[in-house]
Image: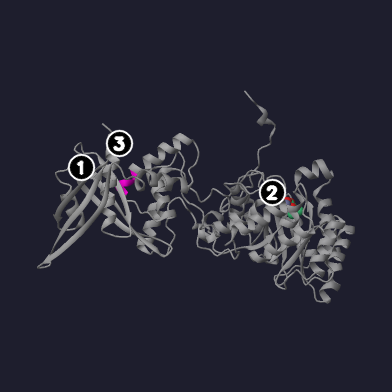
Amino acid sequence: MFNGCKKYIPFHPQPIENRTWPDKIITKAPVWCSVDLRDGNQALVDPMNLREKLDYFHTLIDIGIKEIEIGFPSASETEYEICRELIEGGHIPDDVTIQVLVQARPHLIQKTFEAIEGAKNVILHFYNSTSTLQRKVVFHMEMEGVTQIAVDAADLIYELSQPMIEKGMNLRYEYSPESFMGTEMDNAVEICAAVLDHLHATAESRVILNLPTTVENCMPNQFADMLEYFIRSLPGRERAIISLHPHNDRGTGVATTEMGLLAGAERVEATLFGNGERTGNVDMVTLAMNMYTQGIDPELDFSDINKIRDMYERCTKMKVGERQPYVGKLVFTAFSGSHQDAINKGVQWMKANDSGYWEVPYLPIDPADVGRQYEPIIRINSQSGKGGAAFVMQQNFGFDLPKSMHPEFGHIVQLETDRVGTELQPQVIFDLFKKEYLDIDAPYKLIKHSFHEETTDGHSQVTFTGTLQHKDTKFVVVGEGNGPIDAFFNAIHGQKIDQFTFVDYKEHAITNGSDSMAVAYIQLRDKNGKDFFGVGISHNINLAPLKGILCAINRYKQHHVS
Ligand code: KIV
Ligand code: ZN
């Protein structure tokens, strides 16, 4: 028995009575802050250079993010220079606030103030670690000492900021008790309240308290309990904007954020596609689009997600996973037959009912809303069912096969997927259809024909006269009926090809550019009750069904060579 797990200390949940967050729902977007250029950047194998950071920064602006942590200007010359270029190069729109991070250390704070000189809107973000574990193994310090570091930094920041504010800078403050989730909640409340006091926070001049899940260590509901407890206990809560900064070590960063919002948070620090230290920061795209699918405007624009992904991959040299929500290459694709069938029905239902709501099974979002409308929703492999191939024929080539024909064509496609063992591209599916139905003109072929129509007392009588060829033999057939199909069927009566019953027929137009053709699907039944389909296409709507009938007969003959 493997007992390795015994070395881990289970999380101690924060006791809380009458929690209220489970009964709440998210009703509006939080204030978003991107930490891509700082937390995301510091986690890259090759951090971004100036050109890449600018490229990334402008994309964040285009998305509509108004608060952007641009870096850690006191950490290196490169970081400092990038901050200066953003400010002096005029890259920052007036309605965007840049955020700069600094440790609660005097010389770094000084340097950070130099770096932000001349900026219009700034959030000065300082932090120190408050966690129980780090106090024990890293700092060897009691909570008192940790609090002293934070309030000393707050005093210095407040002092250095006054001249800048007087010169017109819109300067705000943010404090992070790093590893908030690993801190005793009463200690977290105490240090945050002290920082609020030292920064002279008021309800009119609120300070951002950013509560990081630096290392995700508990279930999202347990985090929500902690947060609700923290907010309830914080003296002068109205002086603070409660911000979340979730990482994703347990893979539940999105859930932690969503439950944190229920528990009272108002702001979220996140990154595109969840880049960040270790397992990443929480993914802003997923959070925003999750809100979007609940009818809530996330106030961020992800309507061209592929463009954003391309920028992200170019600048970070990271890859977005194929199953990453809303953006991965495969997330709007269904391979399974029953899923394909349900999607198909949902799409048809929406067309027919004009409902105004998105009601397609298996697709939580309309791919067009993130600019993905051109991709095949349904792809065909050996797991796909009969409806999938029909869907591809309709979506990609305009052939609306009758439902009763789906199993026959689906089976043909299935045999091919089994043979090749890989996914079939739409063109291959069309080629199979063409080979099976459109290219068949043997053993029977219609050489020439004419219709004569007479109408008496509103009753029309059609006469078909045609020359058919069977192998090398040509013969003339004549028949009458109440329509072209009936007349043709009667004409071939008595020939060797009359052992079929006519079951059903469907015809529609397909347009290719300015060229419009009729396509007819014919269902015939042989003496043993087995059905065969034929397809005919022609510019002439009377000829298409005749070709369809001959196609069905020819297919039957080819399958029964005896
Ligand atoms: O994850 C974290 O705790 C951080 C802080 C510096 C905010 O990135
Ligand atoms: Zn972080």
Residue under pointer 3: 559
Label 1: how many Cα within 10 Å (few below 14, some 14–19, many 20+): some
Q: CA distance from mark 3 to mark 1?
A: 14 Å
Which region of the structure is painted magenta? Answer: 403-407
Magenta portion: prevailing SS class: helix
x, y percent for residue 383? 44, 39
Does 270 sit above or below residue 119?
A: above
Upstream in sequence: badge 3 or badge 1: 1
Closest to the observer: 91 or 26? 91
Q: Report, in whole angstroms, how far the alpha carbon at label 1 lies from the one at label 2.
A: 64 Å
27 or 416: nearer the viewer? 416
Q: Nearer the viewer, mark 3 or mark 2?
A: 3
Residue at 14 percent of width and 64 percent of height: 454
Which numbered disc covers residue 318?
2
The picture places residue 540, in percent across and down from the top left corner, at: 30, 60
- The amino acid pointed to by label 1 is Ile
Q: Would residue 141 appear left or right of 242 to someone viewing this image? A: right
Q: Is the CB–ligand 2 distance for label 2 below 8 Å?
A: no
Quadrant in which the C terminus is drawn: top left
**Residue 241 location, quadrant:** bottom right
Q: Which residue lies under the disc numbered 1?
A: 497
